[in-house]
Structure formats: C-alpha cells, structure tokens
Amino acid sequence: MDRGMVGSASKGRLQVEVRHHGASAVVTPVGELDHHTAEVLREPLEKCVEGGRVRLVVDCSKLEFCDSTGLNVLLGARLKAEAEGGGVHLAGMLPIVARVFEITGADAVFTVHESLDAALVE
C-alpha cells in the first residue's frame, strides 16, 4: 500500500498535501479555504481525478475555515469524481467547517466521516 507523500501546494493561508492510501487519494488542506486560496485545493483535486484516483478523501481535520468558494471547489471535485465512478469523502471536520456544510445542506451530498481512519476503512 502506497502511503507516501505525492505532492503539496501552498499559497499564504492554505497548504495542501496529497498522498495515496490504497485506491484513495488523501488530500489534506491545512489553513483557510476561501476565494483567495481555493485554486490551491482545486488543482490537486483535479489532478487526482485526471490521474485515475477517483476516490478522494479530504482530511478536513486541519481546515480552519471554509467559505462558499471552498465549498464550491469540493462540490466541483465531487461531480468530476462521480463522473468517473468515484466520490469525495470528507473526514474529521472541525465544528466551524462542519457548520458551513450543515447550513448549506452540502453535508447531504458528501459522505462525511468522523475521522480519517474511518474514511479509509471503506
């Protein structure tokens, strides 16, 4: 099982790490996801799907903030992954981030897990 780091990106308040875990790509955004930093997350998510990794697990445990632009990045990744037979799983959301998903109803369209370990079991 490949658990190595395969990439990372950074722009000011957001860093994104990508690693492979079995058939999944684990994408870990660290910091604040908003209209200034959304592209930093969008690019690695799209590269994963383009590279055939269509089961995306987004480890949200280090995501401190997410606005509507960030939410749209994740929704877009979900559509692309599902079009290829995969999906986007969200793991370990902090309450401040989970609230955005609850308010908008987006938590109903994602598979949400309490922890990264739980997301990787499937």
Image (cartoon, grey):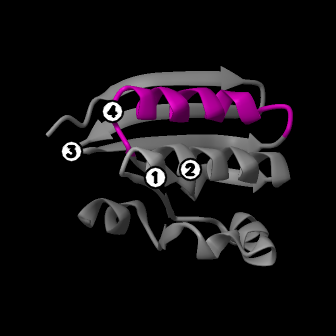
User: Distance of mark 2 from mark 1, alpha carbons?
Assistant: 5 Å
Say which residue appears at 55% left-offset and 52% top-offset.
78
The spot of residue 80 in percent (x, y) is 52, 43
- Identify the mark nearer the N-term, 3 or 2: 3
Of 85 and 46, nearer the camera is 85
- Identify the mark nearer the N-term, 3 or 4: 3
SS at badge 3: loop
User: Distance of mark 3 from mark 4, alpha carbons?
Assistant: 13 Å
The residue pinned by badge 1 equals 82
The residue pinned by badge 4 equals 52
From this viewpoint, is residue 67 visible?
no
Task: Residue 25: name its quadrant.
Answer: top left
The residue pinned by badge 2 equals 79
- Identify the mark nearer the N-term, 4 or 2: 4
| Vertical side of 102 occupied by 72: above or below | above
From this viewpoint, is residue 19 visible?
yes
The residue pinned by badge 3 equals 22
User: Distance of mark 1 from mark 3, alpha carbons?
Assistant: 18 Å
